[in-house]
Image: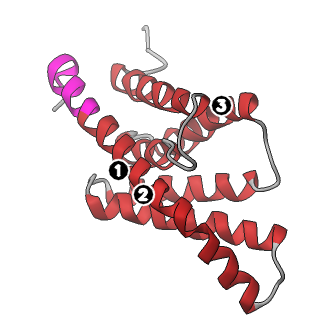
Amino acid sequence: MNKNILTKKQVVIILFMLIAVSFRLFPHLPNFTPITAIALFGGLYFSNKKMAYLVPVFIMGLSDVFLGFHLISLFVYSAFLLISFIGTKTKKPNIFTILMGSLSFFIVTNFGVWLIGYPKTWTGIIECYTLALPFFRNSILGDFFYSGIMMFGYKFVEKKYLNLA
């Protein structure tokens, strides 16, 4: 009996993620990246829960080999796992799900920035989150852009070529 390691659906999901993560390697606006979209996409479309978490993290790790790991990476990956969790629980791509992913990433990663580089006071945390707001705008725009492309693109491929819809 020949059992495929990956289904066609899983291969297509991984390919979409690999293409998306490659955009991190090109010049872009600050925080206008596919990070949230990749985590959310994995959570939404992988039926295998292990793959929903491990594949996006592995793919992010591949791009970070080229971009570098930093002290903040722990918080970025934690936010990434939280966004995958949101995807696995909602199972329905929509505006609210994308906003929850954006907000989760903003809260978790900037908490890390505060811990690493700001005074541990109320003033310090307020300053940290306030200074991060311009980056949050770009994050939301990138999250909607990349999530839209990935989700609509996947639905198109699924209906046209995978006959799974």
User: Where is 8 relative to 132, above or below?
Assistant: above
Location of mark 1 (residue): 144
Q: Is residue 162 magenta?
A: yes
Give the residue drawn at x 63%, y 71%: 131
Residue 162 percent across, percent down from the top left? 22, 20
Marks 3 and 1 sit apart, C-alpha to C-alpha, by 21 Å
Q: Nearer the viewer, mark 3 or mark 1?
A: 1
Three-letter code for the amino acid on which mark 1 is drawn: Phe
> How is the structure coloured here?
secondary structure
Question: Does residue 85 belong to the magenta stretch?
Answer: no
Task: Give the mark, 2 or 3, whose residue is nearer the N terminus.
Answer: 3
The amino acid pointed to by label 3 is Ser
Q: CA distance from mark 1 to mark 2?
A: 6 Å
Q: Position of residue 81 (x, y in %)?
A: 57, 54
Residue closer to the observer: 137 or 35:
137
**The magenta stretch spans which residues?**
153-163
- The residue mark sitting in front, 2 or 3, is 2
SS type, badge 3: helix
Q: Residues within 10 Å of mark 1 (few under 14, many from 20)?
A: many
Residue 161 numbered mark, or none: none
- Residue 140's mark? 2
Q: Are marks 1 and 2 in contact (CB under 8 Å)?
A: yes
Q: Amino acid at mark 2?
A: Ile
Residue ID at (16%, 22%) = 163
Horizontal relation, residue 72 to residue 8: left or right: right
Q: Residues within 10 Å of mark 2 (few under 14, many from 20)?
A: many
Residue 116 at x, y = what percent?
83, 67
